[in-house]
Amino acid sequence: MSRWLTLIILSAMIMPLWAQSSPNLGAVPGAEFLSQWSTSIDPWGNGLPEGSGNAIKGRPTYLAKCAACHGLQGEGLINDRLVGGHATLQDARAIKTVGSYWPYATTLYDYIRRAMPYNSPHTLTNDETYDLTAFILFMNGIISEDQQINQANLPDIIMPNKNNFFSNEFELP
Amino acid sequence: MYMPSKQYKLPREEYVAGNGLLHRRTFLTSSIAFFSVASSSLVPNKLIGQENYPVSMLLPGAPLSGYGLRSKFESHVQRYVGTTAGTTGAGSSRTPLEKLSGIITPNGLHFERHHSGIPDIDPEQHQLLIHGLVDRPLVFDINTLLKYPMVSRTQYIECSGNSRPNLASTAPDLNCGQIHGMISCCEWTGIPISVLLQEAGIKSNAKWVLAEGADAAAMTRSIPLSKAMDDTMIALFQNGEALRPENGYPIRVILPGYEGNISVKWLRRLMLSDTPIMTKDETSKYTDLQKDGRSEIFTLEMGVKSVITSPSGGQFMQHRGIYEIKGLAWSGTSKIKRVDVSADGGLTWAEAMLSNPILSKSLTQFRLPWDWNGQHAIIMSRAIDEDGNAQPTRDAFIDEKGLQVNYHNNIIQSWEVSSQGEITNTYV
C-alpha cells in the first residue's frame, strides 16, 4: 500500500473524530420558542413590540404602579430618581436620571418591560409600557404630553446625554 | 500579658523600611512569635473532668451528618448585608475579608449583589438558549450541560462598585469587609462558553454576546465576543459543589477579571449580535462618570488592587511587638507580581512575601512581619501586576478619575493605628 493511500485512510479515520470533538448535545428550538425568548431591544428599536402609548395615558399607570418607589413626579423616593438633574453631570454631586443620563429611550422601554414594576414584572401590556415610557420622557421635557410613541419612532428620540458616552476600547452603536 | 518587643533583639539589618517593617523572610530565619490582633492572653485552659481531660473527651461527640455545618463558635462570621429600601432581595452583602484566611471564599460567605432577589430555580425546568447571529440556535437543559467536558479555574469576582465607601470625601468608620468585601474568590467549574457558541456556529459579523439572567430583574449585559472566546465559562460548580442560589444556581457566566455585574447569574439566554445592546445596567449604571461630565462605557476590566486584611479597621493591637501584616492582592488582567507594604504612611516601602499559588485574575495572599513600637502608624499596601499596572495613591486616582467616577475604586487603602492600638480607616 502506498504511503499516500495510508495517509488518506488514516485521515478518513481521524476526521470524523475531529468533527465529533464537541459534544453537540443542544436541541434546535422552534420558531415560537425563539420569538418568545427574544426579549431584548437595541438602540435601533430591533425587538420593540407592536403597540403605542402617550404620556396622558401613562400618568395614571405611573401613579398607580411606579410612584410609590420613584415619587409622584419621578423625583425619587425609596428608589431611583427618574426626572431632572439636567446639566449636573459636571457637578460634585451629579444627578443621574433617565432624563439627564440615559443615552437611549429604547433602553427605557426594554428595562420597564423586563423588570418593572419591581414587585410584579411582566404584568404590563405593551401599550402600558409605551405609555409609561412616554410619561417618563414627558416628565423630563423630552417629548410632549400628547406625543404618541411606538416601535417606529421611539428609536428616533434623541436623549439629551446621548453623545456623552465614549469608549476607548470598543466601537459603540 | 505584656511582652516587650526588645526581648527579640532582631538584627538591625532585618528592618527594611520605616516604622518597624521587617524583611519578608524574617520569620523564616528567626524563632520569633507573632502577636495576633485582639488575641487573648496566653493562659493555659483550665483542665476539667475527673481525669483532667476537656469535656470534649469525656463523651462521644455529635452524630455524622449528610451536609456539614461550621462550628457554632464561628457563627459570628457573617456577610455584611445592605438591602435596598423597600425590597428584601435587592442590594448587596459583603465578604468579611478580615475574618478569613487563604484565597478561597467559602460558598456561604461569597459576596452578593442582586437587583431583584434570589430566584428559586428548579434545574429540571431551566433552559439555556443560544441565538442571534448564529448558524443554528440551540437550547440546552441542565442535564445536557452536565455531560460536557468541564474546566476548573480559581478566579475572583469583584463588583465594580466595590470600595465605593472610600469615594466619600471623608474616610468612613468601616472595617475591611464593609469597604472592600464585594470581592470573593472561588474555584469555578464549568464549560468554556466558546464550546457552546461554536456548536451554534458564530456568524462572521458577530462581535458581542448578550447574557440574560432568569431573575425578576432579567439582568442583561453585553459581553465582547473576544472575551467570551478567550477565558469565559458557564459555571455549574463553585468550590466543588453546585452553585449556591445566590451565586447563580444552576448556571452563571464567569468572566475572569471583568467587573462582577457582567458575570450574569441564573443564565438563561445568550444572544450574539454585531453591537452591544446598551442595556440599562451597562448604560445608566456601571459607567464611569468623568470630571468633564462625559461617561466612559464598557470599562470592564478591573484594576490592580490590594488590601491589608490584618491588622485592619475595627481590630485592636494589644501589645507592641511583632505582628504579621496579611492581605490580599489581585489584578483584572494578569498575575500579581509584587506587593509593597508601608508602615509610615507611604514614606518608605518594603516588599511583602507572596504566598503560592499566584494565579492570573485570582486572589494572591501577601504577608510581612512588622515590629510595632506602640506608636501611631499608618499601614498601607500597593500591588503591581505582571502587566506593570500599579495601584494608585489617593491623590493620583482623584487627579486622573475624580471621586464622582463611582466605580472601579482601586485606591491604596490606609489603616491608621493609634498609640492605643485601635485601627481605623483613614485617607493619606
Image (spheres, coloured by chain):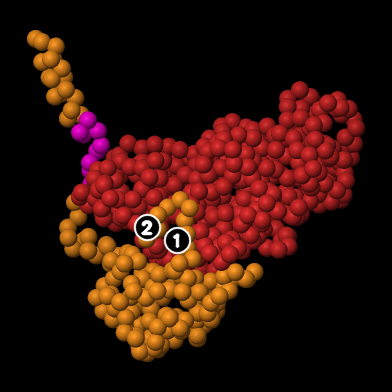
Chain colours: A orange, B red
Q: Residue at 44% x, 86% y: name it.
A: A63
Q: Tell me the tag on residue B404.
A: none
Of residues A22 and A97, which is closer to you in this image? A97
Q: Decide: marks 1, 2 in contact (CB < 8 A)?
A: yes
Residue B275, horizontal then vertical, whole percent: 34, 57
Q: Residue at 86% x, 48% y: name it.
A: B376
Residue A158, horizontal then vertical, whole percent: 40, 74
Q: Residue at 79% x, 46% y: name it.
A: B345
| Residue B296 vertical position relative to residue A55 in the rendered view, above or below | above
- Of circles 1 and 2, the one toward us is 2
Crowding near pointer 1: few (<14 within 10 Å), some, many (20+)? many
Residue A19, horizontal then vertical, whole percent: 20, 33
| Whole-number angstrom distance, CA of label 1 to CA of label 2 | 9 Å
| Residue B385 vertical position relative to residue B161 in the rendered view, above or below | above
Q: Quadrant of the N terminus of chain B?
A: top right
Q: Which residues are magenta?
A: A18-27
**A25 inside magenta stretch:** yes
Q: Earlier in the sequence, mark 1 or mark 2?
A: 2
Of residues B74 and B408, which is closer to you in this image? B408
Which residue has dot 1 on it? Answer: B282
